Amino acid sequence: MSSERPRTQLYLMALVVFWALVYGGSLFQPALLDDADSVHAEAAKEMLARHDWVTLYVNGIRYLEKAPLMYWGMAASFKMFGFRDWAARLPLALGVLGLILAVFGFGRRHFGETSGFYSALAAGFAFGPYLFTRFLIPDVFVALWLVLALDFFLRTLDEPHPSLANCWGLGAACALNVLTKGLIGLIFPLAAIGLFLLLTGNLKHLLRMRILSSTAVFLAIAAPWHILAGLRNPTQGNVRGFFWFYLVNEHFLRFLGRRLPRDYGTVPLALFWGLILVWLFPWTSFLPQALGRVALFRPREAARTPAGRAALVLFFASLFIVFFFSFSTRQEYYVIPALPPLALLVGDWLAEERRAPSESALHRSALISARVLGVIGAAAGAAALFIAARVPSAPPGADIAELLRAAPRESAQYALSLGHFLDLNLRVMGLFRGQLVLFGLALLLGSVLHWFFRARRKPALGNVTLAAMTGFLLLAVHQGLVGFSPMLTSKQLADAIQRVYKAGDIIEINGEFEGASTLTYYTGVPSRILNGRSANLWYGSQFPDAPQIFDDNTAFQKL
């Protein structure tokens, strides 16, 4: 125990320092972006202004489609630190830190110390978790509560009589997940647990899990907000209230692709599946081996050991999440909660490989993965360096908007949350030469060095190399986002408006509010909306007490 404690502290210190460099270092730039980023920050801002912690409002309009937990966190951060961009991002960054520590604890408890460390690196510093915490969406919190829920469940299997702490912990984690993103916060862990107990022939374990008191804990945490939101937002005339819109429309009809308003796209299924490999990069190199190690066809035998039980539960969790969104509307980031379970499986495999004899099949398998990654990484890195060397320099003071070739607003590419980045072309790459060089060098050197260390039977150095490579890649991604952000935010326009704004002036957004939502956030002035009564504000605008801020061309002429 005494020898393990210093190593635990070393691993934790390394993870926290890496988090501080990668996530803490990106809190301050860029400005908040239009659409989800500033819409969600504005909801938290208005929560404070109205002293209403139950009903969300955006631009003075009810915003009933989201669960409240992320907004509570942002509002608390604003209360403590003021309305600063980094304060809006801080709860999400802390959520990532919580996820990293939760994955480390899970891996350490059920697989071993080194497994937990590698798993935490993969879960916190892969491409997907980083990319989809660049704007304010709650999916990393969904992943955090899911990991904790599965951890509490697995602990009950280790006890002859499951303790109140673990059973109630499971109920609390599920409740917090429901308050984060609705019913999937309950469905995902229960599906994984149910599949595990069914296939291992251990359904009787449910009788030992203190279901009544655990359900009471769940309801005590999750129910009050739902009840209050329903009471404060009842059906009014032809406008059905909170329960219909939030539960029926935003859950069941969204899953069936019949949600109102029908103003959303969905990612093609093959792309959704394929991007899982990108979101877990570079650790996807070892995903086939990790999945192959799960005793899927011998579940009862696997369930005899803590590691076998954990592997099965993690596999079922990730499988169900991917399966669930394969039959519903989906965005690229919906798969984020499946990544930590996969990262834990990969981390356990990497730790097992590190312990194996130098001539074992595990090392040979890892070397194959290292070769594939080395070839792909070297080719992609060299391509990035070639582009950086050949693209013409952008003229001094060049406007990125003039160099891009943006698709029409209704283009299908914008159904993707990262669709605007498909507007990039060689003409604009001169503005990103530094980022391309950093990205190319990191990918080329990192993948080749990783291959070198694997070939020398030094897997620990290889894994550290991958982690370091990822850190530099994510830095390049962040700097690229900062450079591209003028295309994604109206902050510069908001600053210009503030310099000339006088009381009584009108700010009018042409089109949907989300297209320039940073104007409202940064100016602090509610915007009128021209020909844009749709998207997130559509339903709230139907309530009788909604402010009359929507104009058509005729009304606009009369202003």
Image: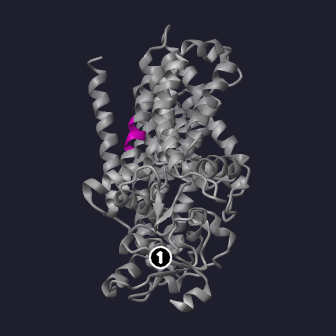
Residue type at mark 1 is: Ala
* Residue 25, placed above or below residue 456: below
x%, y% of residue 165? 41, 20
Residue at 63% in and 12% down: 204
Residue 237 visible to an observer of this rendering? yes
State the residue position of label 1: 389
* Residue 297, placed above or below residue 319: above
Q: Which residues are magenta?
A: 97-101
x%, y% of residue 459? 45, 36
x%, y% of residue 458? 43, 36
Give the farthest residue toward the front.
237
In the image, 47 versus 433, the foreground residue is 47
Its colouring scheme is: one colour
* Residue 287, placed above or below residue 129: above
The quadrant of the picture occupied by the N terminus is top left
Does residue 518 appear left or right of residue 240 in this picture?
A: left
